[in-house]
Image (cartoon, rainbow, N blue to C red):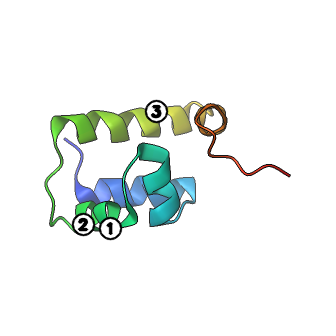
Amino acid sequence: MISGNDVKVLRVRIGLSQSDFGDLVGMTQKNISTIESGKKPLTNVHQRLFAAVGLLFERGLLEDFKAAAGLLESD
């Protein structure tokens, strides 16, 4: 089971702000902050979503995902 602290560790490891991480997973910065602080419980959907983002990161596929989602800044 993924905790709010696990979400924060993942976000920091990826190198994203709460706002940018929220954009990546379709949530607001406030929601990310609330989850990370443990004030908002994670639903099963949240658990799976954060696990999937972590897996993409571990496999080196996060940049491809961000590009497909239109989240990369163009040069």
Circle 3 Cα neighbour tier, 10 Å, few/some/many (<14 / 14–19 / ≥20): few
Q: Disc 2 to disc 3, how far (Cα)?
A: 23 Å
Circle 1 Cα neighbour tier, 10 Å, few/some/many (<14 / 14–19 / ≥20): few
Circle 2 Cα neighbour tier, 10 Å, few/some/many (<14 / 14–19 / ≥20): some
Q: Earlier in the sequence, mark 2 or mark 3?
A: 2
Looking at the picture, does residue 33 appear above or below residue 1?
below
Q: Earlier in the sequence, mark 1 or mark 3?
A: 1
Looking at the picture, does residue 2 appear above or below residue 35?
above
In the image, what residue occupies the spot 17% across and 35% down?
44
Identify the mark at residue 52; answer none if there is no mark: none
Pointer 3: what residue?
55
Q: How many marks?
A: 3
Q: Secondary structure at mark 2?
A: helix
Which quadrant would the N terminus be assigned to in this image?
Answer: top left
Pointer 1: what residue?
30
Residue type indicated by callout 2: Thr
Q: Secondary structure at mark 3?
A: helix
Residue type indicated by callout 1: Lys
Q: Are marks 2 and 1 in contact (CB under 8 Å)?
A: yes
Residue type indicated by callout 3: Leu
In the image, what residue occupies the spot 18% across and 48% down?
42
Labels 2, 3: front one:
2
Q: Are marks 1 and 3 in contact (CB under 8 Å)?
A: no
Looking at the picture, does residue 8 appear above or below residue 57?
below
Identify the mark at residue 34; answer none if there is no mark: 2
